[in-house]
Amino acid sequence: MALPLETLLDTLSARIIAAADELTELDSAIGDADHGLNMKRGFEAVQAERQNILAKPTGEALKTVGMTLVMKVGGASGPLYGTLFMTLGKELPEQPTLADIGRALQASVVALKARGKAEVGNKTMLDVLGPVAAHLESGTASFDSVRSLATESAKATIPMKAIRGRASFLGDRSIGHMDPGARSSEILIAAVCDVLEDKS
Ligand code: ADP
Ligand code: MG
């Protein structure tokens, strides 16, 4: 399928901006209360670059989204989400299937793990992105199964103890709260599913 880039950019931006307070609230429990603000600033910058981004072929457009997020989000999550979009831009063919999206997301997860020196199970965004990438790559995924897996995986970070990121400074006190980055990843994945399902 040809990726509906314009709708994707607008839906992802709108969902993240709408969730800014919730994400900041989650980060206030186990971090420094800025994840929603950081992500909102990043996606507002993507919206400001919208025309420039949409004039490019898909791969270059996604790389520009990634670079914009690196520059504007800041915090730990900026370079990580930046790496995610830049790797997607590098790996996705012009007309990707769901399995191609899975392969590209898997490559992004590998790049993200290297960048953040983190693994699945450390209570980060990887706890959503990792399982979703593996599920998509398995070739058995549907939009519904991806959305439910993202939701369950974000919830599954609640009982985890943070090993990476600012939340790890809290040790055992990080237990009992959802990881903010896991929640923002869930929101992004659900938004992509909603857009692609609507267009397919
Ligand atoms: P900061 O922690 O610098 O304030 P944010 O609040 O924007 O940055 O983002 C926090 C989120 O970033 C965490 O909830 C977690 O999901 C993610 N994160 C932090 N460090 C890492 C890491 N090393 N690897 C993967 N994700 C990480
Ligand atoms: Mg923070």
Image (cartoon, rainbow, N blue to C red):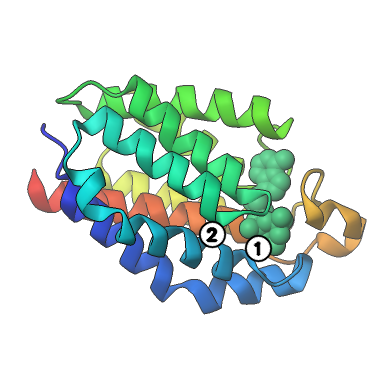
With respect to residue 144, does 134 lie above or below?
above
Q: Amino acid at mark 2?
A: Arg
- Quadrant location of the N terminus in the rendered image: top left
The reply, left or right, for residue 64 in relation to residue 74 is left
Residue behind mark 2 = 183
Residue closest to the eye, 163 or 150: 163
Residue 33, horizontal then vertical, whole percent? 70, 72
Helix, strand, or loop for circle 2? helix
Q: Which mark is residue 158?
A: none
- Residue 19 in sight here: yes
Cβ–Cβ below 8 Å for labels 1 and 2? yes
Q: Amino acid at mark 1?
A: Met
The reply, left or right, for residue 21 in relation to residue 149 is right
Q: Is mark 1 within 8 Å of ligand 1?
A: no
Q: Residue at x 25, y 40 (%)?
A: 142
Q: Residues within 10 Å of mark 2 (few under 14, many from 20)?
A: many
Residue closest to the eye, 180 or 64: 64
Quarter holding residue 145: top left
With respect to residue 86, does 144 lie above or below?
below
The reply, left or right, for residue 83 in relation to residue 86 is right
Residue 200, horizontal then vertical, whole percent? 8, 43
Residue closest to the eye, 200 or 114: 114
Whole-Å distance between the Cαs marked 1 and 2? 7 Å
- Residue 179 in sight here: no
Residue 123, horizontal then vertical, whole percent? 70, 48
Q: Which mark is residue 178?
A: 1
